[in-house]
Amino acid sequence: MVNILQFVSSWALIAAGMAYGQSGLLPKKFNTIPLGGVRPSGWLADQLNVQLNGLAGHEHEFYNYIAQTDWMGGPSRYSTLEEAGSYWFNAAVPGGVLAKNDALLGKAQEFLDYVITHQEEGGWLGPEAGKANTTQNPRYLWGRYPFLFGAIQMVEYDPSQTDKVVTAMHKFVVEANRMLHAGEGMEIWTQTRWADLVMALEWLYDNYPRGQEDLLIDTMKQVKYAGVTWEVVFLEENFPKTAVDHLRNPTGWVLAWHGVNLAEGIKALPAAYRFTHNESDLTRTSEGWDLLFKYHGRPSGIYGADEYLAGLEATRGTELCIVVEMMFSSSFLFQMMGDLKYLDTAERLAYNALPAAITPDHWAHQYDQQSNQIASRNMTPDPFDVNTGYANVFGLEPYYPCCTVNHPQGWPKFISHAFLTTDDGTSLVQVYHGPFQTTATLSGNNNVTVNVETTYPFSDIVSTTITATSSYTHLVRIPSWVVNGTISINGGQAQLLAPKNGFQSVPIPAGQSKFVLNLTPQITFESRPHGAVAIHRGPLLYSLEITYSSKILKQHPQEPRAADYEFDATSEWRFAVDPKTAKAVGGAAPGDTLPSPIFDSNKPPVSIEISGCTIDWDEAGQTFANPPPEKPKCNGAVQKLKLTPYGATNLRISEFPVMTA
Ligand SMILES: *[C@@H]1O[C@H](CO)[C@@H](O)[C@H](O)[C@H]1NC(C)=O
Ligand SMILES: *[C@@H]1O[C@H](CO)[C@@H](O)[C@H](O)[C@H]1NC(C)=O
Ligand SMILES: *[C@@H]1O[C@H](CO)[C@@H](O)[C@H](O)[C@H]1NC(C)=O
Ligand SMILES: *[C@@H]1O[C@H](CO)[C@@H](O)[C@H](O)[C@H]1NC(C)=O
């Protein structure tokens, strides 16, 4: 019986594939699990609560860009679906669901219902609904994309809302298609971010096409061909090899060198590949990714772009929106291409670059974080190009408010993408390491529950317990930095890992089973400009924490916890280090309870001890450090230094001069 059913269903799949043939959408290699299927536990559940006890869970109560009683009647075009409301909603849905925060989820629900019930007759979604004067308030497509992502997540979490959302999306597609054919709806920012509309429409096509396949694909093609030609941007001869401050963009797509546009746009060609079927859309993206990191990469896992691409210098910044968008994009690139490099990066971003730019209590964030950050203050002079000196202040909306509303998507989407399924639905894929609980139904009605007990990345041990209705092959990611790691299955002897394409296959029988990974990270050293070195162990980057005095610059009149701060260094930071002496210290056991919040001074239970000495190292105008001096001489005695996880520091040195004998 089972066999016959399987035969019939695979025959049906083949027939369906033949039916849409060359004009349809190619599948992804890996698929996401509906929102709510992957949940955080342990320290990660605590971290999400910390986030929602901070700005992310409260900004709708007081912050002018989103705290509207009439969602459409915001104070400026920035509100609702132009940028602020849309970004906020995209994060509020998964945040509310995964933290079981009913207040936030209720507000997100109110937003969704308002937008849908105010949809225009013609299909347009947004604040201009009912206001026909499009000269005054032109309609651009982009602001709707994060809203669509949020709505999709809501449907996945609560299928009872499918009909109203899917119907609204289909109505919107008709209008978007009309606009695109009429040459409307695009401006230079919208042109860079077409990937997100394509992905939202692909979701509709995959799940609820309602016979509109041709219209959906035509709309995807229209928005792609009206937008940035990423295949040209990512050509080696066009790609910038230094900070772009004074460079002319040979492609003419000036905004394609903008940091957030790149983080969103790197998904574009792989998203389009599903309908272009052009393999070079994938290879060009992979090459573009490598160029981005080679010429602009940071040891925290991100690339430098304080506003536009910023080269390799340790004091040039990275906007927080880039971090969260790259986390989301990396997962999608993996889903399309199956390359481990995207996941290794996403995990480094989550455990380093994301927490580093936010205060431990999650009330204040930076627009730009720096690898070497010796102050957080109104920087005059500042090391950035476009951005003014306020860009590295921790605050409510330092420099520009987009990250105020966009950064909360980081943790929840990292969590919801921690497990995927293979395209044929037969295997569960454990892609990020951390404490998670997952329930999913694999093909053949195979109900699987997974409990990952670990304090990773503050421990090297990941213990996974699985209950399955029937047997299947479980795939678990083995990060590229693992050397001689081991696996022990059901209490058996530890065996060397033997991953294929970055994944270890673990045969799971029906019933309960358990396996324990020991990922045995080594301390590794990354060469940085000026002969400097960055120090990693496993997914964590280690930094010298700088203590500081804190001064409130500004406080929100209704919410004193929403404040802007100046941080000035109170400890010595001018050290060179001797890499040979680096030694890992500490580590938590899988069942340990970690301090809360964990990303705070001296809280992580891991550190690296290293010898160093003070050197001459100047500041640039009392605000930021000069580049690390090359071949510096000690001007003091050699001493032991403690390096801590980058994500737990607010001021730090991460790119160190190397001690000369
Ligand atoms: C629309 O707005 C423009 C720009 O503010 C204004 O000049 C025009 O008179 C308005 N048209 C209508 C019909 O209100
Ligand atoms: C495939 O994409 C490459 C660049 O990514 C482009 O040069 C080429 O023309 C495309 N091929 C087709 C058939 O469109
Ligand atoms: C799997 O779970 C679903 C939903 O909880 C349930 O309806 C179904 O009967 C389960 N299947 C098996 C084989 O246990
Ligand atoms: C890994 O194991 C091999 C074989 O035992 C050994 O030669 C090598 O030194 C080990 N590498 C590390 C980093 O432990």
Image (spheres, rainbow, N blue to C red):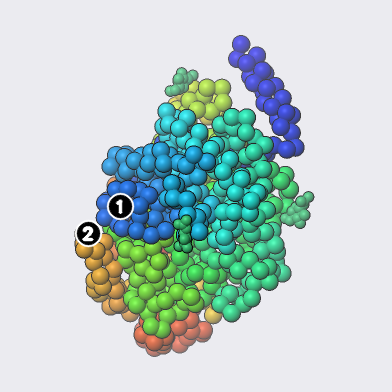
Residue 447 position (above or below residue 410):
above
- Residue marked by disc 1: 67
Q: Secondary structure at mark 1?
A: loop
Which residue sits at x=72%, y=69%? 237
Circle 2 is placed at which residue position? 559
* Vertical arrangement, residue 34 with respect to residue 509, above or below: below
Residue 225 in picture, x, y percent from top left: 68, 53
Q: Is mark 2 within 8 Å of ligand 1?
A: no
Residue 404, percent from left and from top:
37, 59
The three-letter code of the residue at mark 1 reads: Ala
Label 2 neighbour load within 10 Å: few <14, some 14-19, many 20+: some
Question: Which residue corresponds to the image point at 45% horizontal and 32% vertical from the top-left?
Answer: 164
Would you say 431 lies left or right of 589 here?
right
The percent position of residue 7, horizontal first and vertical second, equals 67, 18
Report the quarter where the N terminus lies.
Answer: top right
Label 2 – label 1 distance at C-alpha: 13 Å
Q: Amino acid at mark 2?
A: Glu
In the displayed orientation, state which residue is furthest to the top.
Answer: 1
SS type, badge 2? loop
